[in-house]
Amino acid sequence: MSGGDVVLLLLLVTAAAVASPANADVSYDHKSLVINGQHRILMSGSIHYPRSTPEMWPDLIQKAKDGGLDVIQTYVFWNAHEPVQGQYYFGDRYDLVRFVKLVNLTGLYVHLRIGPYVCAEWNFGGFPVWLKYVPGISFRTDNGPFKAAMQTFVEKIVSLMTSEGLFEWQGGPIILAQVENEYGPMEEAMGSGAKPYVDWAAKMAVGTSTGVPWVMCKQVDAPDPVIDTCNGFYCDDFTPNQKNKPSMWTEAWSGWFTAFGGPVPHRPVEDLAFAVARFIQKGGSFVNYYMYHGGTNFDRTAGAFIATTYDYDAPIDEYGLLRQPKWGHLRDLHKAIKQAEPALVSGEPTLQNIGNHQTAYVFKSSSGACAAFLSNYNTSSSSKVVFNGRSYDLPAWSISVLPDCKTAVYNTATVTSPSAPAKMNPVGGFTWQSYSESTNLLDECAFTKDGLVEQLSTTWDKSDYLWYTTDVDIDSGEQFLMSGQWPHLTIYAAGHSLQVFVNGQSYGSVYGGYNNSNLTYSGYVEMWQGSNKISILSTSVGLPNVGTHYETWNVGVLGPVTLSGLDEGTRDLSTQKWTYQIGLRGEKLGVPSVRGSSSVEWGCAAGKLPLTWHKAYFNAPAGGDPVALDMASMGKGQAWVNGHLIGRYWSYKASGDCAGCSYAVAYNETKCLTNCGDITQRWYHVPRSWLNPSGNLLVILEEFGGDLSGVTLMTRTT
Ligand SMILES: *[C@@H]1O[C@H](CO)[C@@H](O)[C@H](O)[C@H]1NC(C)=O
Ligand SMILES: *[C@@H]1O[C@H](CO)[C@@H](O)[C@H](O)[C@H]1NC(C)=O
Ligand SMILES: *[C@@H]1O[C@H](CO)[C@@H](O)[C@H](O)[C@H]1NC(C)=O
Ligand SMILES: *[C@@H]1O[C@H](CO)[C@@H](O)[C@H](O)[C@H]1NC(C)=O
Ligand SMILES: *[C@@H]1O[C@H](CO)[C@@H](O)[C@H](O)[C@H]1NC(C)=O
């Protein structure tokens, strides 16, 4: 064939697939997805490409394959791909095409969740901040400007995937797509625009002609042909909204996320395996672990108050190491399910009662395959059951898999994979130099307005930081100048954290938390006769990613700001002139970068001072083990290695109840916690690929002040 013939043939193939989805290579029926004519029981795992580095991807994907997965699932992160409207970015950690091709190369499929709302504990739920300022916009409802922007992005991603030949019918790995995300539960609260929006989103998605099925998760009213799917800790009670749709579990939560100030959740693998087996035995045909590798919220990609670690207690840990026995026990489960697949895809199971809380689910195919799942739902006692004349021991809260209806090759509560706890090994400390951030604003960047401004609409999230400064005139006759009874400053803010300086002197900080970002500063401040300068540094800690119209939630000092204890009583400063600066002086000067760090004068280490930059040089630890920083001795801030922002750090104390953890009872995210009374996150991942063998630059911006001598370079081993 000539090149022209190939093109023509491709066009014909494309046209055929578009015109007649029934002939596409991926379709579905009541039982399962059908790929190239074959019904499949598919095991899938979420790996979000920006939460690791491209250098880590091949290993993560290979470990997923070795763990018995068939599919890698990922969201697509709109705010990273279109940081400025109409300007797209697909480089480095956001090289989606490279990621999908690597999955293909490893021989796995892809489930692409385009959203573009993704939640994901990701900054602004994946929406670009500019989207909020499109005139007349309202998010995730029947709103013209929103739908136009959403459609443009969805079509952009689909055409990118198509042009790279990445859909299954093109010989690529993508077998499944997703539009929207967990919209169902909020439909009522979203009012009359919700239902038309759902219908439009489904139609728009299907209209992009991907040639693969679409899902909407947690969407009981997902319009045909879009498949509604389940997310949760358990999904065996889930039934799709049409008889011709398969039962699919798009998020089997392998653990839970961590928020600064919260404890760290863990999900016992015995219970996770039990949940998956429960779903499969009831006819489920697709299970995706959310997350299989959680990774790291590098940069400022974390949602509001979400920790920098996104480990999620996943089978592959944040650093890319196998979490054992979790990974191994699930691999064994997948192997057992694969052995049973010929019988599982053949149709409905028949049920046999084999005890009070014990049931056998039996699958038989016309060609003679037989598989059985023997389950014990009793939370406290094991059970001896008889099935087909043989007897079996079932531990409490467990399922045994019999791929031939005879031999129990696997039991969800019987863990045979050896455990391999991770260890953090100190490598050494650092020699520091410091540079103090100034409360004097840069003339060329500052601007003045009457009254207080909302932070996000001012910064557009270009920086976490916004300075609010104002002058206060104190008359020579003020009583407090004589009595020394200083006036009292009160500041109400929508969050997330703020620091107060008066005449350059620090008066401490206050911050909100994951459950309520609102905060109040209240304290006595020294002032002198004449002009005094109040400087408030307001800091955001990620934008909210979930909630009804979360895009309308405010950040920053909204007021009132008052000064009491004056002769006149209380003076309201809220409406007077304020001067603003977006970002810090050090950010403007590029201090975090290798080049910019030499643009300022560094002095002796001054770790205890608030609002100070620190830098140090270090060599990469020998070997290939993952690298981390121990930041427990510091307060709050950001840290960069060779100009890469490894994320926000915050030694926020975790409150919660960490008592007790039994696998044998329905799990939720409030059980099996660690770190209560300790800080939420101590170690921060420094990807190997960001390091040179020697002379690496570490820059820290510390907001509160801490102990630099405690900052330690670590390696992680198992
Ligand atoms: C995907 O992998 C298959 C099989 O290895 C290969 O033939 C195909 O060219 C790959 N496609 C892409 C887009 O990389
Ligand atoms: C938020 O509140 C819930 C319920 O009180 C609590 O379990 C959780 O730990 C809190 N989260 C954080 C991060 O403080
Ligand atoms: C579990 O089994 C024990 C012993 O047979 C029985 O007494 C109990 O009622 C069962 N309870 C539950 C919740 O399954
Ligand atoms: C935070 O403050 C705002 C404004 O006063 C209020 O509307 C909101 O309900 C508060 N949030 C919480 C969680 O209390
Ligand atoms: C979570 O589990 C605990 C302990 O079993 C239970 O008390 C609590 O009600 C559950 N919480 C939710 C939200 O289901």
Image (tube, grey):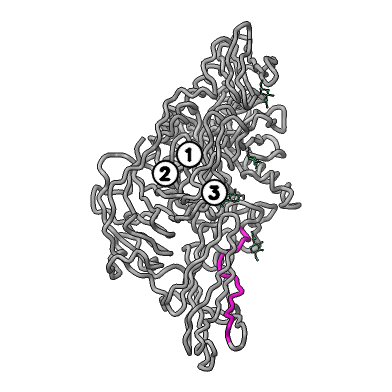
Which of the two discs, 2 and 1, labels the residue nearer the N terminus? 1
Q: Position of residue 306 (x, y in %)?
A: 52, 51
Q: Amino acid at mark 1?
A: Ile
* Dot 1: element: strand
Residue receiving disc 1: 47
> In the image, is 658 to the left or to the right of 361?
left
Residue closer to the observer: 104 or 326: 326
Question: Does the CB distance between marks 2 and 1 fall below 8 Å?
Answer: yes
Q: Local crowd at mark 3 within 10 Å, few (<14), some, or many (≥20)?
A: many
Is residue 123 in view from this perspective?
A: no
Whether residue 562 is visible, yes or no, is yes
Q: Secondary structure at mark 2?
A: loop
Q: Residue visible at 28% across and 64% down?
A: 433
Q: Is residue 487 left or right of residue 299?
A: right
Across and down, in percent, residue 94 comes to 44, 47
Q: Mark 2 to mark 1: distance in Å?
A: 9 Å
Residue 357 belongs to the span the image colors magenta: no
